[in-house]
Every structure is written in C-alpha cells, then in structure tokens.
Amino acid sequence: MRRGFGRLFRRGPGGVPQVPAVLQRANQLMAAGNYRAAATAFEDLAKQAEARSGPRAPFFFLQAGRACMLTGECERCTAHFKQGLTLLADSQRYTQFYRAGTRVIQELKAHKMENEAGEISALIHGHTIAIAEMNTQQLPEEQPLLPTHCPACGGPVRSDEVDWIDDQTAECQFCGSPVRAG
C-alpha cells in the first residue's frame, strides 16, 4: 500500500510527504465553509485516487460526502459516503469502514437526514459478518491528544479513525503525514 502511495505524493526532507496544493486547497475550502467548492475538489481528488487504486480514495469520497451533506445535497452526499465506505470494505479495511460508517450515520442524523442515515446503516449491516471477524487495531491504552487538523494538509484528524504509527504518532488519512500528539 505504501509503495503506491509514494508515487502519489513525493517525499520531502525527512521522508515526509510533500502535500499537493490541490489537497491543501480542498481542506482550506472546507474549513472556510465553501462546501460546494470543497465537495467538487474532494470529488476530483477521490476519482483520481480511485482510478489508480490509491489508498486515500475512500477518505476523499467521505470528505466529499461530508461537504455535500453540509450543502444539503442529500443524493450526492449519500453516493459519496457509500462509495468511500464501499472502497474501505472492498479493501478489507473493516475497522476504518466501521468507525467511519458509524460517524457518518451520526452526522447524517445530526443534520436531520434520517433516510440517508438508514441507507448507510444498511450498507454497514450488509458487512456484519466481515466486521465481526475483523482484526481491530489496538489503540494506545491512554490515547494521546492529537491536533484536530493535520499540520501538513489541513485535513481533519480523528484519533479513533487514524492508523497509529506508535503510541504518540498517527498517520493522516488524507496525506499520510505523521501527526504527533502534542
């Protein structure tokens, strides 16, 4: 998985990925509340990553779905959420699939999108057997406090959804940069 990722982002000094400006811009649009433009930017990133079977594609689709949800584009947000979650399930990343899916359902319900939450719930329950057999990543006993956003790309960091490199460092889902607890 890392080998393909290395082709996507060039490594800078110290092996840290050089984050593409388009990803930084997409996260800036999201942070600024320009959700329509952010949705389009993340959708473009997701399609490009999916075309080359990139491991970050699911997270770009999920972020595109989130942006669409915030603009009230129910059909489009559901399609993006489903695509991102399906990519996670298809690549047998069940821990991330379950955690991201659960969060998506909560967010949809918070935005009064009950039908859409039901569709995502059905998708998750369709993978119940796989989820029951999943190897869950062991989280540190006392989770350190991570920054809310990746210092390299500006993407959101959720300590319960990231891959932990060690007890103090997680990997950004969007750019792969190490994010240290501080």
Image: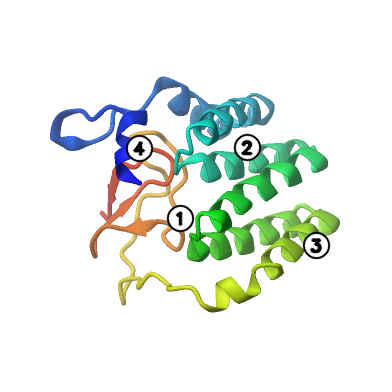
- Mark 1 and mark 4 lie on one chain; the one further toward the N terminus is 4
Task: Please name the amino acid that badge 1 sits on.
Answer: Arg
Q: Which residue is mark 1?
A: 158
In the rendered image, residue 61, in percent from the top left (x then y), is placed at 60, 40
Q: Which residue is mark 4?
A: 4
Relative to 4, 91 lies left or right? right
Q: Residue furthest left?
A: 14
Relative to the observer, which residue lies in front, 17 or 68? 17
Task: Please name the amino acid that badge 3 sits on.
Answer: Gly
- Mark 3 and mark 1 lie on one chain; the one further toward the N terminus is 3
In the rendered image, residue 175, in percent from the top left (x then y), is placed at 38, 38
Relative to the observer, which residue lies in front, 168 or 20? 20
Q: CA distance from mark 3 to mark 2?
A: 19 Å
Which callout, 2 or 1, points to the residue nearer the camera? 2
Q: Which residue is mark 2?
A: 64
Q: CA distance from mark 2 to mark 1?
A: 17 Å
Q: CA distance from mark 1 to mark 4?
A: 24 Å
What's the mark number on residue 118?
Answer: 3
Label 3 with label 2: CB-CB less than 8 Å: no
Label 1 with label 4: CB-CB less than 8 Å: no
Label 4 with label 2: CB-CB less than 8 Å: no
